[in-house]
Image (tube, rainbow, N blue to C red):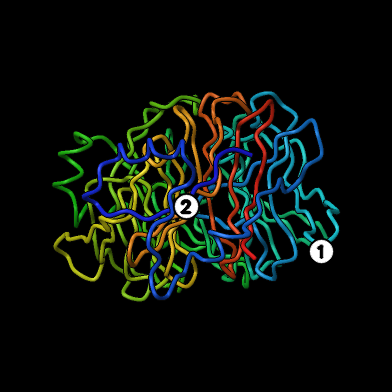
Amino acid sequence: MGLAIRGQFGSGIALWLFALLAAGPIVGAETNDDRLAGWRSGAKVRVVAPEAGRHTIHTYYLANPESPDGKHVLFFSSSHPAGYVGEVRIRERATGNETVLAQDVHTEDAHRVACQQWLANGRLVAFHEVVDKRWRVVVVDVKTLAKTVVAEDRQVGFARPDGDLLPLYGCHWNPGPHRDLYLWNAATGETSTSATMAEVEAKYGEWLTRVFGGKSCSIFFPVISPDGKRVFFKIAAGKGGDNFMCKDASDRQGIVCYDFEKGACIWQHGKWGHPAWMPDSRRIFEAGNITIPIDQEKFGYTTLRDVPRLRGSHPSISPDGELMVTDGMTESVGGKAGEWGVMVADLDGGGWVLLHSFPQHRGARSWRRNDPHPAFSADGKRIYYNASDGEFTRLMVVERP
């Protein structure tokens, strides 16, 4: 299943030391309160849905595919070579029984597939799809399998699985009149406008002009905070037309944070890497192991220097706020040249464990490739991710004892 190593290093130790791996795994000094003990010893890697002949892909590093009650795993199943046409399914963890929630679902790519995600404490599953070149957001009742189209000409951001608010936004390449942030409420069935692009322009107009050159912009890719009180999003300047299957369909940049209770934009940063919320909902964790507080207008950050930085990583934080998981190239931390991997690390002290390294150049042949996108389960005992090391991209899970 690839290379598993363990260790700890400080920022001043040269990476050439990893050449010593030929003699066996490197074991570093453990902290007094070793949060990584379960991941260092006895953690098991397996395929979530081992049936042959299909891709199985979880959405993104921002979305835990496990249901809030821990009983099911949500994923996109596809026998299409490119992986972006298929079914939204749930799989019962105890029995392996699967239920198809939606079929013949056409998506943008295999990178985030249908953006399928849990909502309303697991009662619903939301996703988006394109039908006859027109996008729509669909919500499925898990018990009855009843489907509701909650928005057209829009896509879905990332909600809280235990919450009722589902963020929606206009298609980033051609949003038309849908330039704002919209919230569909699972409790009421109503859709409201939240942050508006006009508000963003009024507060950050100078930055928008400098970055986008006066082009018409829209709110893109909203992610609601763990406490449900805030949301961050990117800004997009579409290029028109209906070709969404290309990297330059729009220009996309920056992070804006909006506070629902204050009804105002409260923070902005000029660059978007791969941000994720910290569990306290007051900080954002970014690629490069940067923690950014959003309670201050002036940009500032803290860098966790003792945690390895993996090239191309998607970092996210464990529910208890003590660990991070990320993906990326592994040669600098002991993996083979050209291989990706999934690593869990201690936010306080820099201890780390490379859980699984593997080739990532095969699998779904989408124009935008799939990445591992690791994410913790709600109880912090499992990490889900995608591996493209064979003919099919497979949803994997590593579980500590």
Q: In the image, which disc is placed on residue 288? A: none
Which amino acid is tagged 2?
Arg
Crowding around mark 1 (Cα neighbors within 10 Å: few <14, some 14 to 19, many 20+) is: few
Residue 104, image quadrant:
top right
Image spot of residue 309 (x, y percent): 33, 46
What percent of the width, then of the height, locates residue 341? 50, 41
Q: Which residue is mark 1?
A: 143
Residue at image position (17%, 59%) is 299
237 lies above or below 206: above
Q: Quadrant of residue 85?
A: top right
Relative horizontal placement of residue 380, taking residue 312 as reference (left or right): right
**What number is the disc on residue 6?**
2
Q: Is residue 171 above or below residue 345?
A: above
Q: Position of residue 63 (x, y in %)?
A: 55, 55
Q: Is residue 370 left or right of residue 52?
A: left
Looking at the rendered structure, the secondary structure element under dot 2 is strand
Q: Residues within 10 Å of mark 2 (few under 14, many from 20)?
A: many
Check the image and name the residue furthest to the front.
23
- Which residue shows up at 77% across the image and 59% down it? 93
Q: Is residue 337 above or below residue 395?
A: above
Q: Is residue 43 above or below residue 58?
A: below
Q: Nearer the viewer, residue 297 or 279?
A: 279
- Mark toward the start of the polypeptide (2 vs 1): 2
The Cα–Cα distance between marks 2 and 1, rounded to whole angstroms, is: 42 Å
The residue tagged with tag 1: helix, strand or loop?
A: loop
